[in-house]
Image (spheres, helix red, strand yellow):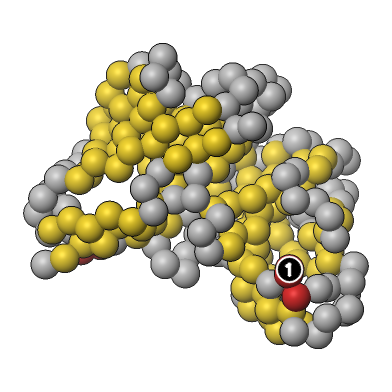
């Protein structure tokens, strides 16, 4: 693995189904993020994790949950998908010690369609 | 509320210079990023400004004026591969990253 990977690349999902988007990084970054990107709205933060074992809510957390059991993995779960969750989802990571902020590195994205 | 404004779309000619502006109103300021995003791809880091002034990196430069809440990205000697969206993002006082909607840059031959 080089950098940050996401799976699946794309997915079509029936409304009401449960779905987990996977994200793995091999850069040993402490901070990880999940964004959704919709046309004309830019990137919106869903959830974040500043370090393994901790998570926080972003701008649009409703309908999503995350976990951070270790440094490398940060899965995003949609408990019961709805059509408004149709979007492109990006996972990102950064090496950001407390009180500072470094650039974020992005995964290739997951294109999710909920019908 | 917090707000970042960028033009939605700009058009420029190959070989020319283009300036993409970003104005922001945020609760505090701890730095500003510019990212490039080609269609269907992930954003990639271009520049970071935390002090006033111009940061130059090859054909790309980024300028910041904290007193005016203003930044611009300057692209010189435009190439067709520069066709992409350019995202401005500001770190607020809580170290949260606030993203603009991005500027789609179209390069014509």
Identify the residue under disc 1. Answer: A85
Task: Between residue B63 and residue A49, name the one nearer to us.
Answer: B63
Q: Residues within 10 Å of mark 1 (few under 14, many from 20)?
A: some
Task: Between residue B77 and residue A74, name the one nearer to us.
Answer: B77
Task: Between residue B63 and residue A3, name the one nearer to us.
Answer: B63
Could one spot residue A42 in this view of the protein? yes
Choose top left, top right, bottom left or bottom right for residue B98.
top right
Q: Locate residue B42 relative to residue B23 in the image: left or right.
A: right
Residue B17 is situated, as x and y percent measured from the top left of the image, at 14, 45
Q: Locate residue B21 relative to residue A109 in the image: left or right.
A: left
Residue B53 is situated, as x and y percent measured from the top left of the image, at 30, 19
Name which residue lies at 77% across and 54% down.
Answer: A74
| A73 up-or-down from B49: above or below | below
Residue A92 is situated, as x and y percent measured from the top left of the image, at 62, 50
Name which residue lies at 82% across and 40% down.
Answer: A56
Residue B42 is situated, as x and y percent measured from the top left of the image, at 50, 59
Name which residue lies at 89% across and 72% down.
Answer: A80
Which chain is indicated by disc 1? Answer: A
Instruction: Name the quadrant of the C terminus of chain B.
Output: bottom left
Could one spot residue B82 in this view of the protein? no
Circle 1: element type: helix
Total numbered labels: 1
Name which residue lies at 20% across and 45% down.
Answer: B18
Task: Between residue B22 and residue B37, name the one nearer to us.
Answer: B22
Instruction: Name the quadrant of the N terminus of chain B.
Output: top right
Q: Locate residue A61 relative to residue A96 in the image: left or right.
A: right
């Amino acid at each position: 693995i080089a950098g940050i990977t996401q799976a699946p690349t794309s997915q079509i999902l029936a409304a009401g189904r449960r779905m987990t988007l996977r994200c793995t990084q091999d850069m040993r970054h402490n901070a990880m993020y999940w964004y959704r990107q919709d046309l004309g709205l830019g990137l919106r933060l869903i959830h974040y994790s500043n370090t393994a074992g901790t998570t926080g809510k972003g701008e649009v957390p409703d309908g999503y949950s995350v976990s951070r059991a270790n440094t490398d993995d940060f899965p995003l779960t949609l408990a019961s998908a709805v059509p408004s969750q149709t979007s492109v989802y990006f996972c990102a990571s950064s090496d950001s010690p407390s009180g500072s902020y470094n650039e974020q590195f992005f995964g290739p994205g997951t294109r999710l369609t909920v019908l | 509320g917090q707000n970042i404004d960028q033009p939605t779309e700009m058009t420029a000619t190959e070989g020319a210079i283009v300036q993409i502006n970003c104005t922001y109103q945020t609760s505090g300021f701890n730095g500003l990023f510019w990212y490039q995003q080609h269609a269907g791809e992930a954003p990639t880091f271009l520049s970071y400004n935390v002090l006033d002034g111009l940061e130059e990196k090859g054909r790309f430069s980024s300028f910041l004026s904290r007193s005016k809440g203003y930044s611009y990205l300057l692209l010189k000697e435009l190439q067709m591969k520069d066709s992409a969206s350019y995202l401005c993002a500001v770190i607020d006082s809580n170290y949260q990253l606030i993203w603009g909607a991005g500027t789609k840059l179209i390069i014509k031959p």
